[in-house]
Amino acid sequence: MGSFSSTAAARLATKLAFFTAGFAMASCAPLIPFIKQKVGADESQFGLLLLCLGLGSIIAMPLTGLMAARRGPRPMVLLGGFGVIIFLPMLTVAETPFILAAALFIFGASLGTIDVAMNLHGVAVENREKRSLMSSFHAQFSIGGLCGAGLMTLLLSIGVPLTMTAIIGATVTLVAIIPTISRLLYVSAARKQPIKLPYGIVLLLGLLAAIMFLVEGAILDWGALLIIDRQLLATENAGVGYILFSAAMVVARLTGDQIVRAWGELRVLIVGAIITILGISTLLLANLPLAALAGFVLIGLGAGNLVPIFFSAAGRQKVMPASLAIASVTTTGYAGVLVGPAIIGFVADSTSLSIAFGWLALLVAVVPFTAYLVARS
């Protein structure tokens, strides 16, 4: 009974860590226009400042893998969690570009730290319970994102001052992270691990994660523009597509563990990729608004459980230590989020946005062709 209660507590702690990461990341987005105005940066300057956030994450992720290999994921979850709590309000009080760059870098590093560590902890909980749990963990990240963006937008819309809005967001994050302190697993440290570049199945998992993160980034950054360009929805209603995509992804992930247990990873990967491709195709071929919105829903349902499977596979493969493998997959996937939307913009500028999304469908087609390698890892 004691073993079950300890794993149940660890399961709750993992869900709260994922919620924390999703909430903190999404809380930042509604603040961005106000922060930009406060430091007086133009678009090109602010674009460079935002790169500091991504740079902080990408530097922190492999370092977190190394530290977690030596100390376990628990201290890194807490370090990342308290980092975002402290530096979310700091973003709103920065008055010069230099101070904002430093705050964005540390905030990004904190997000990168908790991202790798929570996935490592999730794999440790999966191993103890000997069942699929990663989809439900990632569902909490998506739910946290919806709550964070929604709460910050609401507070700003009713006139709550910028810094107070950020403090409220940080307080919610604190309330979520505190219960994890006594519930996170104390995973025994492994021997010191040398820095290694991903190879073998880990490299494949990283590339697949990058593809699926690229799809998510494309829907976030370009989905609304696509349906506006195709004159399917008015500008003020175009954001509905991303809301439906996000809601569908939450539903897919909340039911994903049961589906993986019933069908197995191989089938879920193949069917999920096919549904994602079908959703992109529907979005591109739709002549009616409802059909286009159905495309967003299909993409969310299909893509929702693919990334959690990639992380589970990274945690159990034997080519590299789990901590380094998960750090590699996270870093590569995050690079897809950072670089992908820019690549889509370049392709769209050279051809069209519809053709750029068509290339996305071709990339997703890699998933079913490599599903056997992932499932047997």
Image (cartoon, helix red, strand yellow):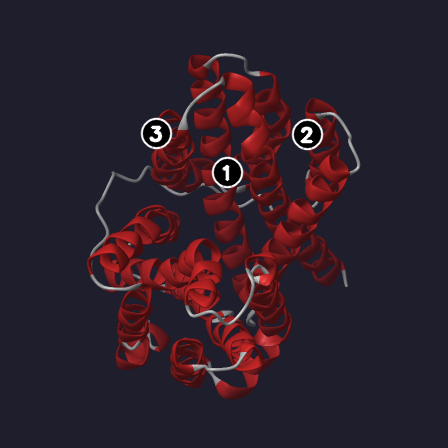
Mark 2 or mark 3: which comes first in sequence?
A: 3
Q: How crowded is mark 3: few (under 14 residues within 10 Å), some or many (20 or more)?
A: few
Q: Is residue 38 left or right of residue 65?
A: right
Mark 1 or mark 3: which comes first in sequence?
A: 3
Mark 1 or mark 2: which comes first in sequence?
A: 1
Residue flagged by tag 3: what amino acid is it?
Answer: Ser
- What is the x, y in percent for residue 150? 70, 48
The numbered dot on residue 44 is 3
Residue tagged 1: 111
Dot 2: element: helix
Residue tagged 2: 166
Quadrant, the N terminus: bottom right
Q: Quadrant of residue 148?
A: top right
- Verify CB contact (< 8 Å) between mark 2 and mark 3: no
Residue occupying image coordinates x 57% and y 59%: 239
Count of numbered badges drawn on the protein: 3
Residue occupying image coordinates x 39% and y 48%: 323
Q: How crowded is mark 1: few (under 14 residues within 10 Å), some or many (20 or more)?
A: many
Is residue 319 among the parts visible in the rendering? no
Alpha carbon separation for disc pair 1 and 2 = 16 Å
Residue flagged by tag 2: what amino acid is it?
Answer: Ala
Residue occupying image coordinates x 65% and y 51%: 144
Q: Is residue 64 left or right of residue 138?
A: left
| On screen, residue 16 above or below 282 | above
- What is the x, y in percent for residue 180? 69, 43
Quadrant, the C terminus: bottom left
Residue occupying image coordinates x 55% and y 58%: 235
Of residues 110 and 188, the one nearer the viewer is 110
Alpha carbon separation for disc pair 2 and 3 = 25 Å
Residue flagged by tag 1: what amino acid is it?
Answer: Leu
Which one is closest to the eye, mark 1 or mark 2? 2
Q: Quadrant of residue 174?
A: top right
